[in-house]
Amino acid sequence: MTGIISRRFGGKRRPAEPGRIPPGQYETRDFQVLSAGPTPRVALEDWDFRVVVEGCEERRWAWEEFCALSREHFVRDIHCVTKWSKLDTEWEGVSIDTLLAGVQSEAKYAIAFCDGGYTTNLPLADITGGKAWIVDSYGGQPLAPEHGGPARLLVPHLYFWKSAKWVRGLRLAKEDAPGFWEALGYHNYGDPWREQRYWND
Ligand SMILES: Nc1nc2c(c(=O)[nH]1)N[C@H]1C(S)=C(S)[C@@H](COP(=O)(O)O)O[C@H]1N2
Ligand SMILES: [Mo]
């Protein structure tokens, strides 16, 4: 009898505890790749990360400078608008708070820009205060190119399209402007707990 029970439950992780998965989502353990175009490849010596405020470049880190910034290791759940959620994903990278330290502006919005041309817009309040990172490591390994390596934005409390892969910088602005998917009908904000998938949700 115990054999049946352990065969049934032993090999699989227990299902997520109630309240862990946002409405309309299901739990998955694999890590799907979702990209609107081909995976861009950039040599690390050509990579940099920029903070641009109202058109002026305020900060720039080359790859080695970025790697020397103080780092955080953390575990979060991620939620894709195509309805999968993946629990306890493990990341390492630099907090957006670290990258914006000392940057003066009246900006209330940010738009992430990427190799390949993808963009996504976020309220500045959603990427500051310990809520977002530029990550270059997943599961203890360098972030794979198809998942956004060398580095991606990670904003786990919003749908995963806000976590821009191959990110190269943030533009801060007083006015909000839709990014790639937001202009094509995805919700401007994208809170998975309120099921903000598309424009009218
Ligand atoms: N640059 C870029 N970032 C992107 C995308 C993209 O097409 N290009 N797709 C977004 C979408 S819709 C999702 S669901 C996640 C998928 O990340 P993954 O491929 O690591 O699962 O990346 C987001 N970030
Ligand atoms: Mo997505």
Image: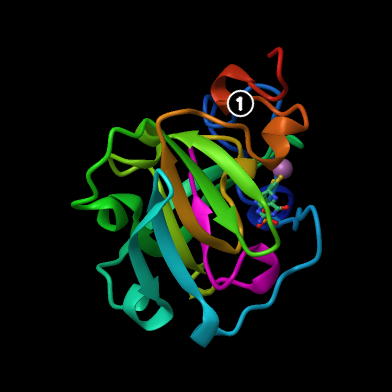
| Figure quadrant of residue 130 | top left
Above or below for 200 versus 43: above
**Residue 144: percent from the left, percent from the top?**
63, 73
Which of these two is toward me, 140 or 143? Answer: 143
Specify whether 40 is left or right of 50: right
Q: Is residue 108 magenta?
A: no
| Figure quadrant of residue 145 | bottom right
Q: Residues within 10 Å of mark 1 (few under 14, many from 20)?
A: many
Q: How many marks?
A: 1
User: Which residue is depicted at the point 39% across and 41% down?
Assistant: 127
Ligand 2, by image quadrant, is top right
**Span of residues in magenta:** 143-157
Q: Amino acid at mark 1?
A: Asn
**Residue 124: percent from the left, percent from the top?**
38, 36
In the picture, the quarter occupied by the C terminus is top right
Residue situated furthest right in the rendering = 37
Above or below for 160 versus 26: below
Dominant secondary structure, magenta: loop
Dot 1 corresponds to which residue?
188
Q: Is residue 144 magenta?
A: yes
User: Which residue is depicted at the point 68% across and 58% down?
Assistant: 11
Which of these two is toward me, 57 or 30? Answer: 57
Residue situated furthest front in the rendering = 55
Specify whether 197 is left or right of 159: right
**Residue 132: percent from the left, percent from the top?**
40, 47
User: Which residue is depicted at the point 44% across and 59% down?
Assistant: 134
Specify whether 104 is left or right of 122: left
Which of these two is toward me, 127 or 172? Answer: 172
